[in-house]
Amino acid sequence: MEEIAPGVAVFPTLIANAYLVGDAARWVLVDACTPGHERGIRNAAEGRFGRGARPRAIVLTHGHFDHAGSAAPLADLWDVPIYAHARELPFLTGQAHYPPMDYSSPGFFTRLARLFPTSTVDLGTRVRAFEPGPIPGLDEWEAIETPGHTPGHVSFFRREGAVLLAGDAVTTMDLDSFFATVTKRKQVCRPPVPATPDWPTARASVQCLARLRPAVIGAGHGAPMTGAADGLQRLAETFAIPASRKAGIP
């Protein structure tokens, strides 16, 4: 676990990142990685905040299994609510399924995604909807709608220090490259290709985030980056829609 900005620490795993945001008196968990990481996340929280540390809430950028996978057991362990955007709730309560992944585009992550489960994470009554605005329990952060990767995807931004937790609206490594993925070479890149169904909206979300000029970007995939505002701006200006999705896209 590494502190990437005051009051923000990353819990990295092989597939995705979670973030502990706040201090011992008041903190939240942003995203919950793949299933099976509840013990590691709990231990990381206690190492950072003290024995018995318990967040105000678990907050999800979106509901894909690599971001919500350990949310249910952690919510039960800590007896705290889980929050997600209202448009994510059908996918997190068993009422709907995300579109099937697109395996037609070349790239390392596309091949790797064939091994991922296709079922969604059912959080039942543990999950609640929040609207864009302050994160429950952390008023200094704002939730920003960044759909495209999923219908209700949100990112979180703190103006003090210009810190952005981007979920999968952007990544900080090139998931299309085996070398870049293995080495985790830092680079601001588009969302994961096989799991992003709405590319024009995803592009608009990247452009929205670029206008924030974040000094720090913590994404769902890749090591956090500092001094990344120019890289994010370049991505917004050159955003490439995968060839397999270009038909009929302006």
Image: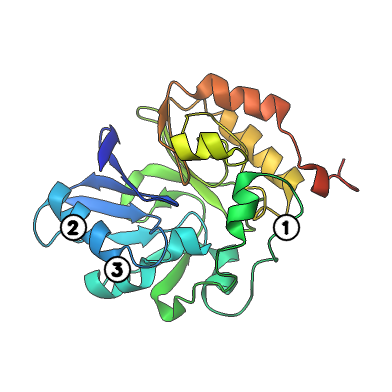
Residue type at tag 1: Asp
Q: Residue at point 39% right, 67% down? A: 35
In front: mark 1 or mark 3? 1
Q: Earlier in the sequence, mark 1 or mark 3?
A: 3
- Which numbered marker is on residue 74? 3
Q: Which residue is mark 2?
A: 43
Frontmost residue, 53 versus 111: 111
- Residue 24 seen anywhere in this rendered image of the structure: no
- Residues at discs 1 and 3 in contact (Cβ within 8 Å): no
* Spatial separation of the CA atoms under disc 1 and disc 3: 31 Å
- Which numbered marker is on residue 84? none
- Judge whether 37 appears above or below 107 on screen: below
Residue type at tag 2: Asn
Q: Earlier in the sequence, mark 1 or mark 2?
A: 2
Under circle 3, the secondary element is helix
Q: Which residue is mark 1?
A: 102
Where residue 99 appears, x then y in whole percent? 70, 66
Q: Earlier in the sequence, mark 2 or mark 3?
A: 2
Q: Within the image, what quadrant is residue 89 found in?
A: bottom right
Badge 3 density bin: few <14, some 14–19, many ≥20, Cα 10 Å? many
In front: mark 1 or mark 2? 1
Under circle 1, the secondary element is loop
